[in-house]
Image (tube, rainbow, N blue to C red):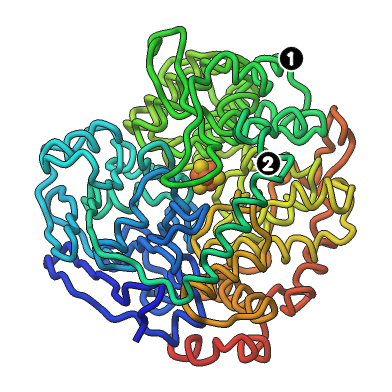
Amino acid sequence: MLKNGFMGKILRVNLTDETIEDESLKSSVMKQYIGGRGLGAYLAYKEIPPHEDAFSPNISIYFITGPLQGTLTPFTPKFIILNKSPLSGSLSRSVCGGSTFGAELKYAGYDAVVVKGKAKTPVYLLIDNGKVSIKDAQKYWGMTSSDTQEAIKTELNDPTVSIVPIGPAGEKRVRFSGVIVGSRAAGRGGAGAVMGSKNLKAIVVRGNKSVHVADIKQFKKLLGETYTAIKENPDVSKRIEFGTPGTLASTYSSGILPTMNFSRSTFDGIEGLMPENVRDMLYVHNESCFGCPLPCGKLALIKKGPFKGMVLPGPEYETIGLLGSNCGIGDIQTVAQANYLCNEYGLDTISTGSVIAFAIECYQKGIITKKDTDGLELKFGDTETLISLIEKISRRDGFGNVLAEGTKRASKMIGQGSDKFAMHSKGQDFAAYEPRALVGMGLLYATATPGANHSFGPTLTAEKMELKDTLTNVKKGKIVRREQNRYCLQDSMVMCSFSRFGMNDSHRLRFVNAVTGWNFSDEEAILIADRIFTLEKLFNIREGFSKADDNLPWRCLNEPLPDGLAKGNTVPLESMLQDYYADRGWNRDTGIPGKEMIERLGLSDLVCEN
Ligand code: SF4
């Protein structure tokens, strides 16, 4: 019986036959997978039928917390959404903060919600302190993310209720549509499209139960240590002043910031995107996710254009990289405007910027013309191109219907060699790190199970600060495995990656031990991370993925960067891959985990049964 840190229950809802059931959470499973991403990988491997389409009603989508949600553990105002990605066909998890949803779900009596089936008409799910109902949402269909949240709050006469909604892009099954919760997004991996495919407009939660902490004395001690560490960390003030965009000056000077569809590393308009300018032009005040001691979020004000006067969450580093420099846009207010539209329509800003930059390069190379683009002339650095295409994608209107399929599918539809510069791995678009200037990130993009998702173990700090080498293959296999495992654990504890400003790996684990009463050592934690990551890999293998899918676009491997600090470099992928597979204990040549490894990780029964 799980008592400490967990509510002990999974809520299962089938929208096809409207059944609602509670299921007990097994202690033995949680000790193997902790929660969050780990629990999601376990459930999805068991339950998702192989080769089923990501939009099939036979597939579930998982909303999962971990043992720390609902306690006062710093950096835990988060929850995980896990689904089969409509972009890559692999398992995708997105971590979402901002609101109270993760904590509120626990207070309502559940550790996770699993939604299967498809409703006949649009609905939302109301989880009201243990009482669950499926409510009509036809009147909300077509509404933007923020309007949906406001309308449901009004209907329930409760301004504090926590809501996970989709926008119009999710309803239209734009393959890279996400979920916007308050001021934050679960952007990557198409969770919004999967909810849309189920006619599920939102999940709404409120509750007043409490989460039990096993060792309150130790918990308080850890709290004190964390707050002291945050206070004494010299990097914290910069993170609070600039947020994630504070990274941009350093990535640009190292040639890492993507520019014009990853075709180059220098950008004439860079001054407009520099952290000081972003702060001065946009920021109104700092914001933190629910109860977080590090307010890295920014509330921004658009000061010009059709959205003048609009207040929105300030663009993050990735958004500035993909909707900004990667589309040739140096005006931060245009980026903010594009960011606002993506949030309202429920689009992932990273994939949106990537597929638009890809389309512009196709146009500039003469591969597509105005006949293909509904009469639009596509140009880098052009506000109209950016905004028009966002609008079209969100509605799947004309050429937007092609781009709504994501870069991989769009390049297949367009053909003519455009796959050479379609910047994705396994269908998931690159984040704002140029792999030829940060080759370990290239290895991460290639090997991350859902495709090029930087948040599966970014290597920027390790390569720049620790190895002091961003351009060669040396030690990259080891570093990538270590960072992937670190993020695997964080995601399973459901903890913000910026917890690094106040905690190290051991410290995070001690919080889990204090809350749950478990006694995991650092070594056992690494085994758990290996187990979860390998299980995600086995999910992919069962779907038919092979070493050929652990790959990067032609451009990264064959076209040297034309300028910037990494000028002349390409990604030495093959040698890094072999080192990486060997470090993971998988077959060095095929990248397949062997029987012995599967046994060592305690996965044999699960794999045999399924
Ligand atoms: S560090 Fe930033 S992103 Fe992380 S929980 Fe705190 S406010 Fe949210």
Q: Give the residue displayed 70% in from the left and 60% down from the top.
A: 483
Is the residue 172 above or below the residue 368 in the image? below
Q: Residue at x 45, y 15 (%)?
A: 302
- The x, y position of residue 492, in whole percent, is 51, 67
Marks 1/2: CA–CA distance: 25 Å
Establish if 477 lies above or below 46. Answer: above
Q: Residues within 10 Å of mark 2 (few under 14, many from 20)?
A: some
**Secondary structure found at label 1:** loop
Q: Is residue 568 something one can see in this rendering?
A: yes
Q: Secondary structure at mark 2?
A: helix
**Residue 60 found in image quarter:** bottom left
Image quarter (top left, top right, bottom left or bottom right) of the N terminus: bottom left
The answer to which of marks 1 and 2 sits earlier in the sequence is 1
Residue receiving disc 2: 420
Where on the picture, by quarter, is residue 270? top right
**What number is the disc on residue 183?**
none
Residue 485 visible? The answer is no
130 left or right, relative to 317: left
Q: Nearer the viewer, residue 359 or 216?
A: 216
User: Which kind of residue does numbered mark 2 sit on?
Assistant: Lys
Residue 532 place in picture, x, y as percent: 56, 74
